[in-house]
Amino acid sequence: MAAGRKLGVLLLMAPLLLWLSTLIIIPHINMFMLSLSEKVDVRVYETGIANYMAFVEEPLYWNTFGRTAIMSIAATFLTLLIGFPVAYYIAKIAKGRLRATLFLLCLVPFWVSELVRTFGWMILLRESGILSGFLQWSGLVSGPVEFLYNDAAIMVGLVYTSMLFMVVPLVTTLDSLDDSMIEAGYDLGGSGYSILREVVIPHAMPGIVSGCIVVFMLSLGNYLTPVLLGGKDSLWFTEQIYAQFITRFNWEQGSAFGFLLLLLSSLIVWAGLKLSGQSLSKTMG
Amino acid sequence: MSDSDQLSHDLECRHVTKSFGDFIAVKDVSFTVPKGSFFSILGPSGCGKTTIMRMIAGFLDTSSGDILIKGRSVLDVAPNRRPVNMVFQHLALFPMMDVAGNIGYGLRRRGLPGPEIAKKVGAVLERVGLPDAGPKNINQLSGGQKQRVAIARCMVLDPDVLLLDEPLGALDLKLRDHMKVELKKLQSQFDTTFVYITHDQSEALVMSDQIAVMNKGEFEQVGTAHQLYYDPATAFVAGFVGDSNRWRGKIQTRNAKGAKVSATDGLAILAGPISQPLSKGDDVDIFVRPESIVISFDAKGVGKFDNNLQGTVEAVLFNGANSRTLVRETATGTQVDVALPQTGEFAELTPGTEVHLGWGRAQARCFAASDDVGVI
Ligand SMILES: Nc1ncnc2c1ncn2[C@@H]1O[C@H](COP(=O)(O)OP(=O)(O)OP(=O)(O)O)[C@@H](O)[C@H]1O
Ligand SMILES: [Mg+2]
């Protein structure tokens, strides 16, 4: 009887276990092994940390690494800053049709592929693009202006791509906040700001944290947006990984980089959870 | 009205009306609440009670009319600056703070120093009988304790008027009975004006100094519990407050002492003094309370009454001191609900027994017929 139940549980869990092991655990173990092997000669490998040492010794690598981390954090905060009022409006102020329409508007960008979306930004921002043309036409500038290929362009692209993933969890948690809670705050003499700080944000914290985690991971691991909008001077760490794997055929170095990125994202998410006093189970549950 | 007169009122509403589009939720409501009294608004679900409350608290604008607190109009005062506080229908305690944090919220907003806040919070918790609850989490409290914390959270701000929107609605029956007494006690303890809304008449009758009975956005009658029960002004109030036997009929003859009414089921009833302008031929509703009907085993016992009839006991509804019997009248077959006297004489009453019933005409109240008699 007990054995039968055990088997049933095992069968139910099988797809999940299969997915976890084949797509996540096995490749990562493999990658980890790969990252620890040094090439000493053609087809001769030794175990060692030379790949990680290469990262430490080459400023370009860890500069890019740090830049990627800081820009991703900045993109996450920017998304939160723009997304929170939007989510608050959708969840608490808009009613009926307007609410559904606004939600849909957040979703619309995802009807086209990421590539096309990013090209859209390029059409707007490039030297011969719409924004530059408009500025020249209005007489604000005398010659064409290049908005592409800098950090601001990457930031715009990242925030745009991530907005939905911030707004959805925020709307869900704000929706569950009883309106009378906000009214009670006013009734007891609270100002809009104090209610936001003491009632609304603490209630929305799980949504804020889960939205931030998703947006941060998406930004950190993004490849297309930094490559297309950032150009040569605005390197992203994923570009380094791509270069090692594809351009240089140096899988060992690429694996080491991949592992470092995984470590970095885990570390920052952990720090974020600690700082906000949330736990992962509370955020995701 | 003189100034001193106005100052003895904590709250006054003058011809307050609220419409949502075409729908009028509150229609020309006027009332005054004297300082330190317990005022209830009683009415069926959807009659506009919460709407009045939200206008007083400032969450809704009035369509017309004026609201005065301590003699001063508050229409242009924002809700967070009005000297009223509200206990919400579902309490709306802040789950992200502990009990002390909840109670101290309003004091912090007023910029009081920390030690003073702690002192006041401790004092008010003491008064509501929860001296050790300060560091507790909101979801660690029982229903009745939450209730008291919600009241303490308002009372610590020392409001001129405390508004309570069906605060006992979520509690079970037993606790509700207990909290009724508790609330009344808290009100006299704090000596604050309470405005309490409910659709439960027993809550209103037990606690209030004054009750307004509301129906479809209008006040039908304002008075003490005693007045509403024994001297209802309209058919709606007579039907809504307390239990009654009710007959629909037509006035046969009308004089200074009252009227003779023939009910649609054939019963002829002599009804008491009539306050409404009714005359011969008008459709009326007659209300007779079960406890004002005298029951007797022989005809002599009820002979002296204006109305007397004969019937058989159909059922005995035992409910301790509130036991009733249903009597089927012999001639017309109409059913009468009669309260059983607790003298022991009717302890052994069984279905099928022949009984005689009687009541004075003053006990039979007569109002213009209304199909809108409060049934919740
Ligand atoms: N914002 C609004 N827009 C339109 N109609 C409303 C609005 N608020 C309330 N109403 C209507 O006004 C009427 C009175 O509502 P209200 O909430 O005051 O009832 P209530 O007496 O408190 O009822 P309950 O005992 O069920 O709480 C209802 O018919 C309701 O549909
Ligand atoms: Mg209500």
Image: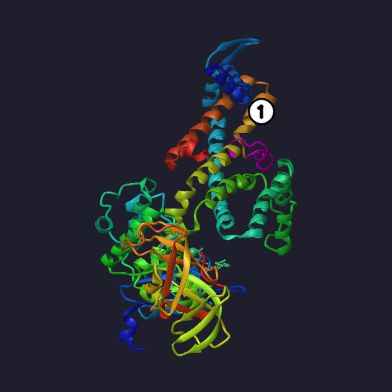
The answer to whether residue A14 is left or right of residue B340 is right
Look at the image and tell me in which quarter the N terminus of chain A lies.
top right
- B220 is within the stretch colored magenta: no
Q: Residue B233, image x and y in percent?
A: 45, 79
Place residue B230 in its image quadrant: bottom left
Foreground residue, B200 or A36?
A: B200
- A222 is within the stretch colored magenta: yes
The answer to whether residue B295 is left or right of residue A151 is left
User: Which residue carries the number 1 mark?
Assistant: A243
The relative height of residue A23 versus residue B274 in the rendered view (above or below) is above
Place residue B228 in its image quadrant: bottom left
Residue drawn at 53 percent across, 47 percent down: A77
- The secondary element bearing badge 1 is classed as helix
Which secondary structure type mostly characterizes the magenta part of the structure?
helix
Q: Which residues are magenta?
A: A219-233
Residue B237 can be seen in this image = no
Chain designation of label 1: A
Asked whether mark 1 and ligand 1 are closer than 8 Å, the reply comes as no
List the single residue furthest toward the bottom.
B256
Numbered marks: total = 1
Q: Residue A42, image x and y in percent?
A: 66, 10
Residue drawn at 48 percent across, 32 percent down: A267
Disc 1: CA contacts within 10 A as few (<14), some (14-19) or many (>=20): some
Type of colouring: rainbow
Identity, as a three-letter code, of the amino acid under mark 1: Ala
Q: Residue B141, image x and y in percent?
A: 36, 48
Foreground residue, B113 or B348?
A: B348
Residue drawn at 49 percent across, 44 percent down: A206
The relative height of residue B345 versus residue A216 in the rendered view (above or below) is below
Place residue B127 in its image quadrant: bottom left
Q: Residue B269, image x and y in percent?
A: 49, 78
Residue A204 can be seen in this image = yes
